[in-house]
Image (cartoon, coloured by chain):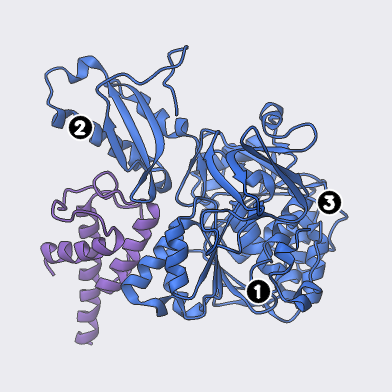
Chain colours: A blue, B purple
Amino acid sequence: MSSYFYNLIPAEELAQVKYIPTIPEFLNWIENKWSDKPAASDTVNTYTYREFCTRIARKRALLNSLGLEKGDNVAIFERTSIDAIEMFLAATSAGYVGIILPTALPAQAVIGCCMKFRVKVLAVREEFSGMVKDAPCKVILSSAMSDEAAPSAEVDRNDPAAIFFTGGTTGAPKGAILPHRALMRGAFNGVFAPGSQLGWHRQICLLPLSHVFGLIRSTLSAFYAGAEWFPAEDMKATIGKLPVIKPTLLVLVPGLCEILLGLVKMYGVQFLGGELKTIIAGAANVAPSLISEFDRMGIKLLAGYGMTEGGNLTTGNADVLTHPTSVGKPYDGQELKIVDGEIWFRGDNTFLGYYGDPEKTEETLTEDGWIRTGDLGYIDEDGFVYITGRIKNLIILANGENVSPEEIESPFYDYAELRDVLVSEQSEGGKSVIAIEILPRPGFIEGKSEDEIYGHFKKVVEEVNSKLPSTHRIGKITIRKEDFPRTGSMKVKRN
Amino acid sequence: MTRNEILDGLKELMALVKPKLDLSGIGEDSNLITDMGLDSLSMLLLSLGIENKFSIRLPNQKPFQAVSEVIDCIAEQLSAEGQKEQTTQNK
């Protein structure tokens, strides 16, 4: 282990924590270690670690009563809530595989996911239960539990624990299968930030649990550290409660950091509650200006790097003020190297493969266990890692989700008046925006002014936008006068 | 409160949410995404700003596209609040 991370927390705290490679062992450890401390709160109900683990054991008993076999898939369609995380931990500690579905999924996609991933049980939030009447599996309420508790199952560190969607949430997502060791390595790595971390934090989870950053760093790491965890079932309402909850640590995507800054400008720094010391930012590029703006308020904003396939946390930067453009150093339990400019890593944190997709798995995971990240970068002489670009054709959305441009482009091909479109991520004033270039059909533009043509396609974009999830919407339109550069097979060439 | 007054209030919030945006051309017909470049997160900030500035709660509905939709919604909530107050006073 590089002592880089171990030295961040006081020696007496370092002596108390260890890497625990499976969820059942982890639940056992947090129950004994943090027993009567508050674990999870929705500001109405608060459960201690002991109560929280008992509720998980009762949900485990319920799942066990449904005739599931080890390794069966259990999907959860919920908001970021106590019920959601309890059901996920119940499933994984009972030897099943947990799949947390994105809350924004339309009913049809939920059913589609249940079929694609051969889900045996779907645990659903009561308000969504009307959407899943046609689910091809058993449906239970995520709040349901048995009267009796059931013990955890025996699991191996390499057994699959969870499937996460990556590479698009509205089309045909890939399902990255993470074993227990990877979830727990990410969770353990997340404990390390400068200063005391154990037994006192209050953390609001503003990120979706369907994303590794929400589930691992923002949630499992919080339980590792004995924090009190407040899930944001409703993002707007929870942000409004910041002055009451007074969080001490937040895990955010850069877009949410911007929101906090906007709120501070509107209502003053006291809106953050006055006790916020640390922000962990990631899942998208963190601008150095964000780091310095929070530093001026006495809040340390720490950036890192990771991906779903690598258990969330690959590198972390505790020296943001001296190395603001770096994503930091590799965490413990893994190796990291640069191959032809591309970042590769392997270790406890690597995934097992994509569900039902050996071809895509082979593209990403080498025979000897390295993950080809698709990100370009370099390591400086002090061991700091820098990301310089991306090989993979993916757009990182403001909320940290990834989407392929083709997914946003496809609805445009229903419009006969355009010949081709190209969607890309562009930077505008330091912020990234989803941009579209449109090549109209020659017959359509004849006799029309530039304003008329722009006005028409603006309406087309607005129409498509109204059908896309709010995170996927196009904010910048360019009309092309000349054809796109094309490949040998006449496809539009992407940069 | 008239629609113009609501629009002026909205513009003040927009100046905080999107400091570099040219507000002079913003009117009821403007589109929040394609004209003003708001993404889902800046929309969330705008909603929080609206709730505080106008002392209303915005319903969690389909996200807004046009400025006129935002004004409709604020006007509706303000009138609902006004009616509530009226009822309380009448009691």
Three-letter residue code for mark 2: Tyr
Residue A454 circle label? 2
Q: Reading the chain from its start, which is encountered first: label 1 or label 2?
A: 1
- Please determine whether, in this image, residue A163 is positioned above or below residue A365: below
- Quick check: A290 left or right of A156? left
Does residue A141 show up? Answer: no
Q: Reading the chain from its start, which is encountered first: label 1 or label 3?
A: 3
Q: Residue at x 54, y 51 (%)?
A: A283
**Secondary structure at numbered mark 2:** helix
Q: Badge 1 sits on which subunit?
A: A
Residue at the far front in the pictured view = A381
- Please determine whether, in this image, residue A348 is positioned above or below residue A108: below
| Neighbourhood count class around disc 3 (C-alpha, 10 Å): few under 14, some 14–19, many 20 upward | some
- Asked whether the residues under marks 1 and 3 belong to the same chain, the reply is yes
- Asked whether the residues under marks 1 and 2 belong to the same chain, the reply is yes
Q: Nearer the viewer, residue B81 or A208?
A: A208
Q: Position of residue A114 (x, y in %)?
A: 63, 40
Residue A227 circle label? 1
**Secondary structure at numbered mark 3:** loop
Q: Residue at x 80, y 61 (%)?
A: A19
Instruction: Give the Cα distance between marks 1 and 2.
Output: 52 Å
Instruction: Give the Cα distance between marks 1 and 3.
Output: 25 Å
**Placement of the C terminus of chain A among the 4 image quadrants:** top left
Three-letter residue code for mark 1: Ala
Three-letter residue code for mark 3: Arg
Q: Reading the chain from its start, which is encountered first: label 3 or label 2?
A: 3
Instruction: Give the Cα distance between marks 3 and 2.
Output: 56 Å
**Placement of the N terminus of chain A among the 4 image quadrants:** bottom right
Q: Position of residue B90 (x, y in %)?
A: 19, 85
Q: Position of residue A164 (x, y in %)?
A: 64, 45
Residue A157 circle label? 3
- Quick check: A458 left or right of A103? left
